[in-house]
């Protein structure tokens, strides 16, 4: 994993001139956690969690069996929960 | 095959609290094999309240609030962030070129899927840095499919191949055709305080000129983009000391430079020895 410094990302988002809308620490943390996911999991997160497609729609879009979409999201949620819990003491 | 799993197990599978990897795999396989089970799990999913999804949606709300096409162009074209510090790009994800042929994406998708696929891969970096690393699509409503460029990728896939090739070998001052990306030119080569070889360069694409600074090193030993900025003016006399280069890049060079500029044979030797 090339990710070793979540602080980099947070610093970056806070830089002047960077047009990032609201920056709560928690939102940054969640976005960083999503970024850390393997891309196959992140695609599913984007479709099902963010865009609120159903598992079946996401499966169709990704050309994957629905059980695979579900398991990827399951693992993504577990990873997100772990990351967020681990970093949770931020404020 | 519907039998072996309890609703509790399936609910845990759905909400990511199932720790048993083998069981996750087994449930995945069973769902894939058994449409009835798939339906049962889908029904369960509808009944589930998913706090994780809410948290993620909230975190991405600034992006999600925009209508989809605009959202895409926001990711691909920075709305107002003309200057982007990419110090953290090393942690970001590769931003693939969106398919120009929108039919060439993933099968069975809606019209926007190929673009969306490109976007999801870069979703976070897009949000974090306020825009793409480089775009030719210019401000006034750029075309999302038009031609973003991957300068840096997160997990170390540092630079687009043509760009990496230029950084690897091109001497300063030599314009390089970056296949499909635009034109590039290294303007300055130096070593930073850590002894890494760094190169400031320009990219010209679709009438827009961008400046960037990349250094060797990192997890993969490739080039990592340390700073990036866009300028409105055309390339012109840019070799004049980088004075009109994007401020973020100038600042990054100032902060990092720890050698005289390397030119000529010295530069070539250092490049061979980076």
Image (spheres, coloured by chain):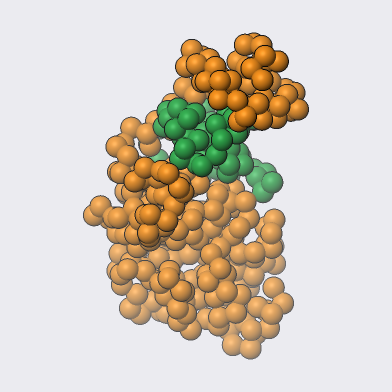
Chain colours: A green, B orange
Q: Which quadrant of the view contains residue B182? A: bottom left
The reply to whether residue A5 is visible in this rendering is yes
Q: Which quadrant of the view contains residue A71? A: top right
B167 relative to B206 in the view: left or right: right
The residue located at (44%, 52%) in the rendering is B105
Q: Could you say where residue B15 lies in the image, as x and y percent from the top left?
A: 59, 20
**Residue at the extreme left of the image, as rendered:** B140
The residue located at (65%, 78%) in the rendering is B271
The reply to whether residue B258 is visible in this rendering is no
The residue located at (43%, 70%) in the rendering is B180
Q: Is residue A11 above or below residue B265?
A: above
The residue located at (67%, 44%) in the rendering is A4
Q: Return the residue nearer the eye: A25 or A59.
A: A59
Q: Is residue B22 above or below residue B78?
A: above
The total number of labels drawn is 0
Q: Return the residue nearer the eye: B53 or B204.
A: B53
Q: Could you say where residue A66 lies in the image, as x and y percent from the top left?
A: 55, 31
Quadrant occupied by the C terminus of chain B? bottom right
B232 relative to B93 in the view: left or right: left
A12 relative to B190 in the view: left or right: left
Q: Is residue B143 above or below residue B56?
A: below
Quadrant occupied by the N terminus of chain B? top right
Q: Could you say where residue B148 lies in the image, as x and y percent from the top left?
A: 41, 59
Q: Return the residue nearer the eye: B104 or B208.
A: B104
Q: Could you say where residue B183 lies in the image, as x and y percent from the top left?
A: 42, 75
């Amino acid at each position: 994993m090339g990710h070793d410094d979540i602080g980099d990302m947070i610093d970056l988002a806070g830089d002047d001139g960077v047009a990032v809308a609201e920056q709560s620490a928690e939102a940054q943390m969640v976005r960083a956690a999503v970024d850390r996911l393997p891309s196959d999991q992140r695609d599913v997160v984007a479709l099902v969690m963010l865009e609120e497609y159903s598992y079946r729609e996401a499966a169709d879009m990704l050309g994957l069996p629905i059980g695979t979409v579900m398991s990827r999201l399951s693992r993504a949620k577990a990873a997100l929960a772990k990351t967020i819990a681990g970093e949770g003491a931020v404020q | 095959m519907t039998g072996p799993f309890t609703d509790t197990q399936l609910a845990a599978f759905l909400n990511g609290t199932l720790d048993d990897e083998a069981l996750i795999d087994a449930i995945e396989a069973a769902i894939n094999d058994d449409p009835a089970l798939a339906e049962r799990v889908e029904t369960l999913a509808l009944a589930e309240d998913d706090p994780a999804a809410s948290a993620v949606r909230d975190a991405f709300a600034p992006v999600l609030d925009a209508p989809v096409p605009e959202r895409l162009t926001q990711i691909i074209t920075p709305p107002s962030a003309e200057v982007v510090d990419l110090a953290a790009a090393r942690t970001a994800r590769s931003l693939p070129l969106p398919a120009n042929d929108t039919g060439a994406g993933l099968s069975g998708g809606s019209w926007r899927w190929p673009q969306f696929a490109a976007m999801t891969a870069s979703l976070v970096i897009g949000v974090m840095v306020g825009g793409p690393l480089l775009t030719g699509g210019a401000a006034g409503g750029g075309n999302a499919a038009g031609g973003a460029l991957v300068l840096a990728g997160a997990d170390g896939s540092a630079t687009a191949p043509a760009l990496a090739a230029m950084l690897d070998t091109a001497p300063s001052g030599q314009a390089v055709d970056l296949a499909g990306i635009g034109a590039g030119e290294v303007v300055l080569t130096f070593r930073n305080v850590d002894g890494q070889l760094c190169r400031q360069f320009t990219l010209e694409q679709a009438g827009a000129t961008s400046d960037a600074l990349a250094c060797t090193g990192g997890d993969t030993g490739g080039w990592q983009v340390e700073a990036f900025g866009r300028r409105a003016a055309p390339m012109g006399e840019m070799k004049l000391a980088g004075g009109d280069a994007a401020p973020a890049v100038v600042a990054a060079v100032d902060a990092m430079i720890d050698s005289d500029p390397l030119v000529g044979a010295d530069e070539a030797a250092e490049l061979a020895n980076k």
